[in-house]
Image (cartoon, grey):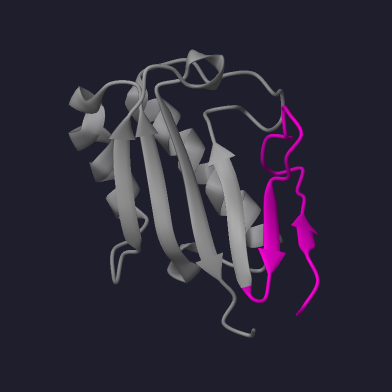
Amino acid sequence: MTEKIIVRTENAPQAIGPYSQAVGYNGLYFVSGQIALDPATGELVEGGVEIQTRQVMANLEAVLAAAGLNFTHVLRATIFLKNMQDFQKVNAIYGAFFDENPPARACVEVSRLPKDVLVEIDVIAASPTA
């Protein structure tokens, strides 16, 4: 696999800028940051950080699935939080998706996220068939 693969799915929010939901190359898949948008409506999922985190993880799962992958293929994740005080809540939900051999990860607090969401997560995954 030596050409760039663009991953698209209707089961995750459509890109709201000049980027792809995910891009694959040489067996690595770079999944763009997902926020708590409902893929059916494109609207922000209202509620606290826990509801938003669940939607973010569902969106990531949909993009990974479109590439033929799942959370076991994730090598690295980056979590962006509007407020680091939400870390424990986000970590508990995030951790439920990685019950064994979790990926490397960074978590940072940022001053603002798109659409003023509370959490955004991106991942890098690897195809086992590459």
Q: Between 15 and 12, which is closer to the camera in this rendering? A: 15
Q: Specify the segment rendered in magenta.
A: 1-27
- Residue at screen point 55% across, 21% down: 114
Q: Give above or below for 80 relative to 78.
A: above
> In the picture, which quadrant includes the C terminus?
bottom right
Q: Position of residue 45 (x, y in %)?
A: 53, 21
Q: Position of residue 71 (x, y in %)?
A: 46, 62
Q: Give above or below for 128 relative to 58.
A: below
Q: Give above or below for 44 relative to 10.
A: above
Q: Position of residue 44 (x, y in %)?
A: 57, 19
Q: Position of residue 33 (x, y in %)?
A: 54, 40
Magenta segment includes 25: yes
Quadrant of the image occupied by residue 64: bottom right
How many numbered marks does the figure carry? Answer: 0
- What secondary structure prevails in the magenta region? loop
- Residue at screen point 41% across, 16% down: 47
Quadrant of the image occupied by residue 16: top right
Quadrant of the image occupied by residue 53: top left
Q: Give above or below for 48 relative to 18.
A: above
Magenta segment includes 122: no
